[in-house]
Structures are given as structure tokens and as C-alpha cells.
Amino acid sequence: MSKGRMEAFSDGVIAIIITIMVLELRVPEGSGLTALKPLLPVFLSYVLSFVILGIYWNNHHHLLQAAQQVNGRILWANLHLLFWLSLTPFVTGWMGENRFAAGPVALYGAVLWFAAFAYFLLSRALVAHHGHDSALASALGPNVKGRVSLVFYTIAIPLSLVNSWAAFAMYVLVAAMWFVPDRRIERTLAP
Amino acid sequence: MSKGRMEAFSDGVIAIIITIMVLELRVPEGSGLTALKPLLPVFLSYVLSFVILGIYWNNHHHLLQAAQQVNGRILWANLHLLFWLSLTPFVTGWMGENRFAAGPVALYGAVLWFAAFAYFLLSRALVAHHGHDSALASALGPNVKGRVSLVFYTIAIPLSLVNSWAAFAMYVLVAAMWFVPDRRIERTLAP
Amino acid sequence: MSKGRMEAFSDGVIAIIITIMVLELRVPEGSGLTALKPLLPVFLSYVLSFVILGIYWNNHHHLLQAAQQVNGRILWANLHLLFWLSLTPFVTGWMGENRFAAGPVALYGAVLWFAAFAYFLLSRALVAHHGHDSALASALGPNVKGRVSLVFYTIAIPLSLVNSWAAFAMYVLVAAMWFVPDRRIERTLAP
Amino acid sequence: MSKGRMEAFSDGVIAIIITIMVLELRVPEGSGLTALKPLLPVFLSYVLSFVILGIYWNNHHHLLQAAQQVNGRILWANLHLLFWLSLTPFVTGWMGENRFAAGPVALYGAVLWFAAFAYFLLSRALVAHHGHDSALASALGPNVKGRVSLVFYTIAIPLSLVNSWAAFAMYVLVAAMWFVPDRRIERTLAP
């Protein structure tokens, strides 16, 4: 089964998620620049989610470039990832509108945790299909970044109930760590 | 006529439907986790609809992979399917916001019934174009799953007026039955 | 310049328009089936607009299949068409929510008029680029249907101020006339 | 790394932005044509933003046609551009609903400024990757239009606080200047 249509569908879904998120930035009543002030936390959430979705798209792009074909399990692992990503606009809006209150920051982290886990499952499904000695498997390697992300999110979720800004800082840290696209794959695939 | 653009258009529409559905999950007022409680039925509806749309995309993918070309009738059969799928966000929101009340659950089932019927018509249009002795026709076979789905929905719609949870359970059952992508086609097309 | 990306962009825009239109079908308050009654005119508008956009996509598909390449003028003629189509969700919602009152039905017709005219300009830009003796030009022929549509809309717009249902019937008639994809092109391109 | 998926993703995001912008045109209460009058400034903003996004899509199309491949830096420069473009629906709605008041017109200009700057960075990232003596670099040339746009926006933003219509006229002027797709590239790539 060819991977082209799965790539196209994923691109479509991620493109829509990244774009409809801006609908949470509701047009304010007044026309003064002060009318924008209450939107600042929503904007900040939006920027973080935009970067995180950009990272997912970027890494997804790299991951599938290393893949040769897909099967039913991979299609569903991919839809599972898209499911968690599709919840981003909701948690982004909730976190922003409540100015980074404990509960919303925890839920935001939970959605990130599940998305990171779903990405991990997708990588595993791809490795299972291509073989543990495939170029894709050796390109992914021990997947340190993926494991570190999950550990960080696992710490940040309870932390958010104590200090939500510290949790938010951890989300930013994970995003910063992934900002560079997955060099492992680029390096291994290079001729 | 090539099938590429019809696939791309269908992917686009399904990707948008699956994603804008999340807009029915309205950001709640409070910041406590209790503020999320009234959203649970909407979330549950969302999960079911996400899975059902995932199944449609998956099977649509398989179905068109077996197809060689499309004609005007197939294009319209496809648009007819997309029409019913496009009503999913509306019925999902209505069912969730009314906590699985009888009327909305019945209407949800009716939309699923029409979508399943439209998928059946699309398969028939494809078989008519490719011939009853084509790889596509033998791959589809007697289409037991498609017929069972229609029977289940036909039972579930009146049932929902008596016991809406039993009807909901039947929708879940049909989804579970389709969860695995259409092995018939994969098997027949395999070299 | 290749036509691929223009096709993909148009498909994307039409897919989004056809899908976000369903957001005008607002989830009603009650759970009884009577709660749906006020939505009927919105639903009816939605069905007509869905069919009309399906026709545009279909004919656009055929038109560009006959085209070999595009230039700057064609790209802008295409964006001009997409602009008028993008207003469909707005006029569909306005017409439905006002139960086919005179003003909204007239405006709906005006948007259809401009879309039909934009499609006509796009055809002309394509013919100008491919030459009047090209396969595309002879495939389009005298473009009777396109001219008839414009005449019908020109009559329907003032008519809607007198009898909005008669105008609506004319919109349905034009859609019925176009329902079949453009046989002229299919016939000419057939081997 | 191939450029195909980056083009597809960009097309998707721009198609969604250009289309969801129409959701800012809220369906009015009354059915008389006078009910549309307060929507005129929103419509005017919509037209300008539609044209500007059309120009970006058009030039992006041309720019990437001249490119051979992309790397991580280019992917991020592209996402950076899409970020600023994604804010267009918000500032378009704010500007329209406040009938071109000073603050919203200034913010609209600021988003245009950042989008223009992001486009400039994307061009530079592409030139850096393809080499200063590449076809792409010589096709872009001294990029006079890009620089003029930035200068115009830089003047228009403070100007809007004095006379918002003059600033708006400058935005229209920049759009008019770009209306014609980038002939430089078309000319250089021509055989």
C-alpha cells in the first residue's frame, strides 16, 4: 500500500488544526490596543501550539520519508496521532482563556503526552513493518528525544497543579528540544 | 478520467470534517476540571465520530486503490457520500449536547445509515464501471459487512427512541466491525 | 507553468467551502425532533449550495483536465472564481435563516451570477492561452449552458424581490441543468 | 529532501486561511438589504485580505517552482511565514468590525509587515541553500518589490494612528504592486 495518500491526509488534518486554532483568538469588542490585552495569554498559547504542531508536521514529514509503505496498523496509528493533535485547539483555547490556570495547563500537558505517545506508537508500527534492521529503524535509533519528551510531560502534568508556569516552561523546553528537525533520519538517509 | 483528483478532494473534505468537529467541543467557562464534566458526552460523541470518519477514509482509500478510473456517475456517487459525512459534525454536536437523548441519537443513526448507503452506491458505481469480473468486483465480493451495517443501523434508529444507549452501543459495534481495514481488497490485490 | 498546484489549491478551497458551510447549521437547543424544524430552510439552502459547489468542482476538474498549462492571468481568473464561491457559506446561511426572504434570495442569486461569470472568464483565459483552435476551445464549444445560466440568474435576481420561491426554483433549475458533468469535454477528449 | 510535501502543506494552510476568513462575515439578523450595511467594512477588509493571500499563494508558487529542494531551515522559514498569514483572519475581522479605526488598521499593517519580512527570510533561506549563483538567486534579483513593501508597511503603521484611511490606501497600493505574479522568476526560468 502506498504512503502517498496517508501523507496527504495527515498534511490536510495538521494544516486544518494549525489554522482553525486561530478561531480561538476571538475578535475583541473595543478598537483600542488595550482591547487586545486580555487576548495575550490566548495568543501565547497559540504561538506554543503552532510551534508544537509545526514540529509534529516536520517530524512526521521526516519519518514518512524514511518509510517505504504503510499497512492497516500504521494507518490507524497515524489516525490515533491525529486524534490527539485534533484536541490541541480545544486545550489551547481553554489554557489561554484561563490565563494558564492549573487545570487547563494540566490538561494541555495531558494532550501533549498522549500525542507524544501516539507518535511513539506510530514509529514502532513503522519499524515493525520495515524490520528492525531497516534504514528507518537505524535512523530512529534509541529515540532518546521521544522518551525524554514523555518523561518531561509526565513530570509537568502534576507540577502544573502546584506551579502552572513551571509546567508551561517545561512544555516550551520540550518544543525547543524538538525545534530542529530529526537530524537522525536526515543523517542516516544522506548518501 | 483519472482518479487522483477525486481522491485528493475526498481526502480534503474528510480531513476538514474530522477536524472541524472539534469546534463542537466549546471551551468551557470555568478553569476547574469540573468545568469539563458537561463536555464528557460531547467528547464521547466526538471519539465515535472520529473513529467512524477514520474508517470511511480508510475504506475509501482501499476502495479507490482497487479502482482504475472514474466517470461522472462515480464522481457524483462520491459527492453524495461526502454530503452525508459532512452532516456528521452537526449530529455529533447535537447528540453530545443532549447527552444521548432519543431524538439526536436517532438522527445520528439516520445520517450513518445514509452514509453507509451512499458508500454502497459508490461501490456499485465503481463495479459497474470496472465490470463484474474486474479485480475490484471480486475484491469487494458479496459485501457482507456493508449489508450488516445497514441492517444494524435500520434496527438502531427505532431502538434509539426506546433505549438510546442500546442504539449507541449498536453504532459502536458497527464501528468495531469495520475497524480493521477492508482485508478483502488487500488480500485480492496482493501479488 | 504546471497546472498541478493550481488544481490542488482549488480543490482545497472548494473542499473547505463545501465543508464549513455545515457550520451554519447551528446545533439547536432542545432534543426533540421539533427542535430541528426551524433548521429545515437552512438545511434546504445547504443542500442546494452543496450541489452547486459539487458542480463547480466537477466542471473545474473537467476544464483543467483539458488544459495543458496555466499562466498568471489564469491563476488570477481562478482566484476570482474562488472568491465568489467563498461567499457561498455566508449567503447560504443568510438565505436559510431568513426562510427564503426576498433580499437574501436576491443576494444568493447575485453571488451565483458572479461565480458563473468568473467561471466564464476562467474558460476564456484558458482558451486565450491554449488557442482558439485547441482541443480545449473546441471542447468548450459555444458554451450554451454557461450563457443560459447567466441569463437565468439575471432573471431570477429581480424576480426574487417579487416571488422569492420562483427565483429559488430557477436556481434549482440551473443546478439541474449542470448536474451532468460537462459531456462536451469528455466527448471531445475521448480517444 | 523533496519540496512537494512543503508545497502541499503550504497550499493547504493558505487555502484554509483564505476560506475561514469568510466566517468573520457573520450572518446578520434582519433580512432587508439594509441589514448588510454594517457588514460593508468587514467585506472590504475581506476583499483586501483575500487578494493579499492570493498574492502570497501566487508568489509562493513561483518561488518554490524555482527551488529544487528544501532543508530544515527552509521548512521553518516557511512555517514562520504561515504563522503570520494565519493571523490574517483575526486582524481582518478586527479591522472590519471597527470600521478601519486606528488601532486595528495599525495591527493589520503590523501583521502584513511580519508576513512580508517572513517571506523575505524564506527567499533568503532558499537562496542560501541553492547558492548565490543559482537560477533561483538570479531570478529573485535585488528583490526591489519586497523591500518597497516593507518600507511602505513601516510608514503605514504609524500613519494609521494619524489617518487610518491613508494607511489602508498604502496597503492597497502594495497589493496592487504585487498583483502581477513575479515576472522576474517567470522570465528567468523561461527557456
Image (cartoon, coloured by chain):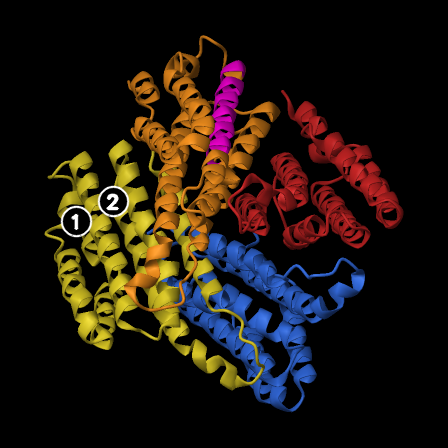
Chain colours: A blue, B yellow, C orange, D red
Q: x%, y% of residue C5?
A: 52, 36
Q: Chain of mark 1?
A: B
Q: Secondary structure at mark 1?
A: helix
Q: Which residue is mark 1?
A: B139
Could you classify mark 1 by the number of other residues whose Cα lies within 10 Å: few (under 14), some (14-19), or many (20 or more)?
A: many
Relative placement, left or right, of D156 versus A176 is right
Per the model, the C-alpha gap separating discs 2 and 1 is 8 Å
- Which chain is indicated by disc 2? B
Does residue B97 lie above or below A4 as drawn? below
Instruction: Say which element carries label 2.
Output: helix
Work out whether A114 lies above or below C107: below
Residue type at mark 1: give it: Ala
Picture residue at 36% right of the left edge, 40% below the top: C48
Task: Identify which residue, C180 or A107, lies in the foreground.
Answer: C180
Position of A177 relative to C139 (above/below): below
Image position, residue B49 (x, y; %): 34, 64
Magenta includes C124?
yes
As displayed, is residue B3 above or below residue B57?
Answer: above
Membership of C65 in magenta stretch? no
**Residue at point 69% right, 30% down?**
D179
For marks 2 and 1 on the same chain, the one whose residue lies earlier in the sequence: 2
Rendering quarter of residue A146: bottom right
- Amino acid at dot 2: Ala
Q: Which residue is mark 2?
A: B66
From the viewer's side, name the closer residue of A29 and A144. Answer: A29
Cβ atoms under marks 2 and 1 closer than 8 Å = yes
Residue C138 placement: quadrant = top left
Magenta-drawn segment: C108-128
Residue A122 in view of the camera: yes
